[in-house]
């Protein structure tokens, strides 16, 4: 198949959507498909840029900084991608974002009468504070805009049941399928033995119980609650150490909070990590925790699971589809710092249970492998292409 993927998020941008699109393009190319990705440029440029990357073509259009969200970039939907499709039309279009590049996908599908699938990745209503629209009117407008966009697709994909239900609730009329995100389970894997783990820990000066968070350091992630829960748990776990993997606009604020809690000597901020360096950091951990109430199906949680880590997460939105309470971790009530601390203490003192939960996490994560996801996506594409041909 000839597959054109449109997304306003793509590496070097650091986001779950960017990684999902990149991984999907690579895996589809491995299956022998001709894949082309249209996205925004990673820096200011005056024209389009085309290059080959990991078996697929990458087309970048001029962009500018998206001031409402740090390090994100936007372009204008002025049809710069249409000339590529005019002379080399795909069998199907897959759009991942309802912004400028996404609207070019909608326009291309309409003009050239091509089948189009849209994946919606995020509960946008939880990110409205960045645009100063975090109110009831802003939330209604966000859902109206989102549903209006995806109702122009032939089919919609959601990574979680939770988001799929919300889309239908707010007016999605098109068929919807749930296809979970996927990760590289060959890269993200448990540490082989205790000796190797101890060597990795030496880098961070860790000898005791190690708790970790991975993700963007932004208000919607509630990372401050993780620090507070760790400080509370440390009262009964003197050797506890917290590693924060990631970066973002809240980093300075979180460092001030660490000092206020007198935890700054027991918290390590690594910044963004990539590839094997990221895996090594995850392999130092005993337990993963997130207090975020905005998650759909975050790659960060899947990657920690693949590394054999049990998790503590908030019982809301897509997280209960990943953390099975009392099977591979614990679910806690939103904003309940005391309950988070209690579960940290409980697992830290139950080494056998911690190990069992970790083994279960790894088994569950194997269901989200990249090759399996690509095959499922391939079948969806074939289905929609056949339906489009039958309707003519």
Image (spheres, helix red, strand yellow):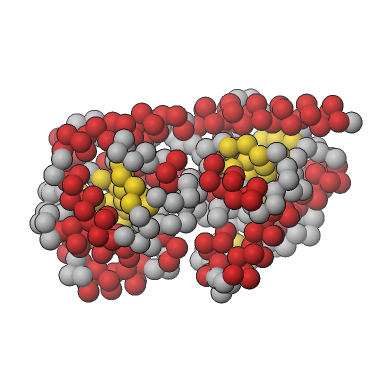
Tell me where residue 186 sits by quadrant.
Answer: top left
Residue at coordinates 69% horizontally, 60% vertically from top-left?
A: 144
Q: For the C terminus, which image quadrant?
A: top right
Q: Position of residue 214 (x, y in %)?
A: 36, 52
Residue at coordinates 66% horizontally, 39% vertically from top-left?
A: 176
Relative side of 27 to 257, left or right: right
Q: Position of residue 174 (x, y in %)?
A: 73, 42
Q: Does any portion of residue 277 appear in the rendered image?
A: no
Q: For the N terminus, which image quadrant?
A: top right
Q: Does any portion of residue 164 appear in the rendered image?
A: yes
For the residue pair 270 and 374, the one nearer the viewer reads as 374
Residue at coordinates 27% horizontally, 71% vertically from top-left?
A: 257
Tell me where residue 198 sits by quadrant.
Answer: top left
State whether residue 83 is above or below residue 383.
Answer: below
For the residue pair 44 and 184, the one nearer the viewer reads as 184
State whether residue 27 is above or below residue 294.
Answer: above
Total numbered labels: 0
State whether residue 265 is above or below residue 182.
Answer: below
Tell me where residue 252 sits by quadrant.
Answer: bottom left
Relative side of 361 to 47, left or right: left
Q: Position of residue 328 (x, y in %)?
A: 31, 37
Q: Position of residue 212 (x, y in %)?
A: 28, 51
């Amino acid at each position: 198949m000839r597959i054109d993927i449109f997304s306003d998020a793509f590496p070097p941008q650091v986001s779950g959507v960017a990684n999902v699109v990149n991984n999907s393009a690579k895996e589809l190319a491995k299956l022998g498909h001709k894949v082309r990705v249209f996205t925004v440029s990673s820096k200011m440029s005056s024209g389009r840029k085309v290059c080959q990357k990991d078996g697929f073509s990458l087309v970048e259009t001029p962009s500018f900084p998206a001031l409402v969200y740090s390090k994100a970039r936007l372009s204008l939907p002025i049809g710069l991608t249409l000339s590529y499709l005019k002379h080399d039309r795909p069998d199907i279009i897959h759009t991942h974002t309802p912004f400028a590049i996404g609207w070019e996908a909608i326009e291309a599908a309409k003009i050239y009468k091509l089948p189009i699938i849209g994946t919606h990745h995020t509960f946008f209503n939880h990110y409205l504070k960045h645009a100063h629209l975090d109110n009831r009117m802003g939330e209604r407008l966000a859902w109206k805009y989102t549903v209006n966009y995806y109702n122009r697709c032939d089919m919609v994909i959601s990574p979680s049941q939770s988001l799929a239900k919300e889309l239908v609730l707010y007016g999605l009329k098109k068929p919807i399928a749930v296809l979970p995100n996927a990760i590289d389970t060959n890269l993200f894997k448990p540490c082989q033995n205790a000796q190797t783990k101890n060597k990795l820990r030496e880098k961070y000066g860790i000898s005791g119980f190690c708790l970790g968070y991975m993700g963007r350091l932004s208000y919607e992630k509630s990372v401050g609650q993780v620090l507070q829960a760790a400080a509370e748990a440390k009262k009964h776990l003197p050797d506890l150490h917290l590693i924060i993997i990631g970066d973002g606009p809240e980093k300075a604020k979180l460092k001030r909070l660490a000092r206020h809690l007198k935890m700054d000597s027991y918290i390590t901020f690594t910044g963004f990590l990539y590839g094997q360096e990221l895996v090594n950091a995850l392999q130092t951990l005993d337990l993963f925790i997130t207090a975020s109430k905005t998650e759909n199906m975050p790659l960060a949680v899947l990657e920690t699971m693949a590394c054999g880590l049990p998790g503590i997460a908030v019982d809301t939105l897509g997280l209960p589809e990943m953390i099975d309470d009392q099977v591979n971790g614990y679910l806690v009530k939103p904003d309940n710092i005391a309950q988070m601390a209690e579960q940290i203490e409980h697992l830290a003192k139950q080494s056998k249970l911690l190990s069992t939960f970790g083994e279960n996490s790894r088994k569950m994560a194997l269901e989200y492998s990249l090759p399996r996801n690509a095959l499922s996506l391939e079948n969806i594409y074939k289905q929609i292409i056949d339906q489009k041909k039958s309707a003519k």
